[in-house]
Image: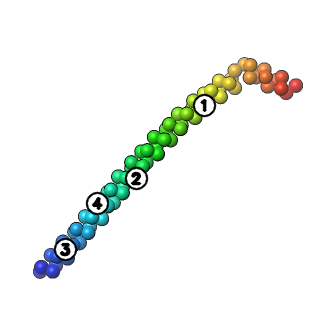
Amino acid sequence: MVLFELILGIVVVVSCVGILNNFIAFKNKSTENIDGLSERIHKLEELEERIKILETIITDQNYDLDQKIKSL
């Protein structure tokens, strides 16, 4: 009976350690994902600003005139 309880105790401890390791690994990945998303959001905001500037340049009336002059 004691041997069975010892084996059962070892199995429980090993299982708990495995679950704890998985939890810690998942938490670390979540933190990395959040940092990566933060960087992507910042880069996306920069790109949106650049697109606004390019749209302003292209829709400017002088840009169209410059293109017509260059095509002559």
Would you say 59 lies left or right of 9 here? right
**Which residue is tagged 4?**
20
* Mark nearer the N terminus (4 vs 1): 4
- The amino acid type found where label 3 is placed reads Leu
Pointer 1 with pointer 2, Cβ within 8 A: no
Q: Identify the element where label 2 is drawn.
A: helix
Q: Residue at x 22, y 69 (%)?
A: 12
- The amino acid type found where label 4 is placed reads Leu
- The amino acid type found where label 1 is placed reads Arg
Q: Identify the element where label 1 is drawn.
A: helix
Separation of residues labelled 4 and 1 (CA atoms): 46 Å
**Which residue is tagged 2?**
29
Q: Residue at x 43, y 48 (%)?
A: 33
On screen, residue 63 above or below 35: above
Label 2 CA crowd tier, 10 Å (few <14, some 14–19, many 20+): few
- The amino acid type found where label 2 is placed reads Lys
Q: Determine the image quadrant of residue 66.
A: top right
**Which residue is tagged 3?**
8
* Mark nearer the N terminus (4 vs 3): 3
Q: Identify the element where label 3 is drawn.
A: helix
Q: Residue at x 29, y 62 (%)?
A: 19
